[in-house]
Amino acid sequence: MFPAPDALTICFAHVAYQMQERFTLRDTGIKSIQVRGRETLAARLKEAEILVVSGLWRNELLEAAPKLRFIQSIGAGTDQFDRTALAARNIRLASASGVNARAVSEHAMALILAMARRLPEARDNQHRKHWRGMIGDLSQREDELGGKTLIIVGIGRIGGRLAHLAKAFDMHVIAFRQNPAAGPNGADEVHPLSDLPKHLPCADFVALTCPLTKETEGLIGAEALAAMKPSAFLINAARGRCVDEAALAMALIDKRIAGAGIDVVYEEPLAQDSPLWTLENAFITPHTAGETRRYEDNVLDILMENLIRLRRGQAELHNQVV
């Protein structure tokens, strides 16, 4: 039997998020503690039956967690957790998959709009107090999205919502997923991932919203970038390792594609000597697509649903991993 709420302690572990503060406002009667670092987590984990964590987790912490019954990941990724070790200790694990689907899809759409409307250039001009004049060269003007083709690689929760947003701008959306039989999820058409190379030349925007897998790692490399139109833009709201970063930098330097809006890079933070920092046709946000004012509450909604299921003895958790 899972402990009653008044017998539980939840440990919230994150370097910045205000998890405990938002949880306290729910007045659940469940005791909670907040830690900000790995050393403090190791010291206080022995008090908790529930752990809400992501980046601070290390599998050796299991030895410091005699009472632990359930881990709710703060993020969608759970590769950092040893599932076999958790199962051996009868510790359940759930991800926060979908927690930021709305936020990331909106951010990807914002990057598309920023590149089409040349907003990074406008901001740079503002800093220089430069009022740009009218442009005769059509290829150098701001553009409209209506009628443009958007390729979305990964048409799950995030990609599906991005497809719906893009359709509101009258874009033609082509989706790619591992299993096309799962449906287009708002796109005009859907194809297997293996067909991506032959469709790249027709895209005005290529947006990555896919998970990092062996099929998607390095998916956009020199060959894929060479297949894109010189007027096309790459949008990466997936994982940095889905793109060959050196090949992307060279494609941008040589203007073989028009530009890139990227929220993720191969290794974060982006190295100070990366050429991406200073390229006018690169627009970088620091992996903030999913980090909104509602993020903590979105995670807590999943946590509370899973605590109800655990209390009822239900076998299946929301976003169950173990």
Image (cartoon, helix red, strand yellow):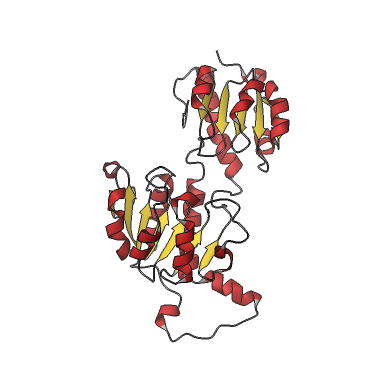
Residue 180 placement, left or right of 104: left
Q: Where is 27 relative to 1, above or below? A: below
The residue that appears at 46% across and 75% down in the rendered structure is 142
Residue 125 position within the rendered picture, expressed as x and y whole percent measured from the top left: 60, 77
Give the number of marks.
0
Residue 30 placement, left or right of 93: right
Q: Quadrant of residue 243?
A: bottom left
Q: Where is 67 relative to 24, above or below? A: above
Camera-side residue of 256 and 237 = 256
Residue 297 placement, left or right of 156: right
The residue that appears at 46% across and 62% down in the rendered structure is 248
The residue that appears at 63% across and 60% down in the rendered structure is 272
Residue 88 position within the rendered picture, expressed as x and y whole percent measured from the top left: 51, 17
Q: Is residue 187 visible?
A: no
Camera-side residue of 189 and 231 = 231
The residue that appears at 63% across and 26% down in the rendered structure is 61
Q: Is residue 250 visible?
A: yes
Q: Where is 110 relative to 87, above or below? A: below
Residue 198 position within the rendered picture, expressed as x and y whole percent measured from the top left: 27, 59
Q: Where is 6 relative to 211, above or below? A: above
Q: Quadrant of the N terminus?
A: top right
Which residue is outermost to the top? 1
Residue 23 position within the rendered picture, expressed as x and y whole percent measured from the top left: 65, 34
Camera-side residue of 229 and 122 = 229
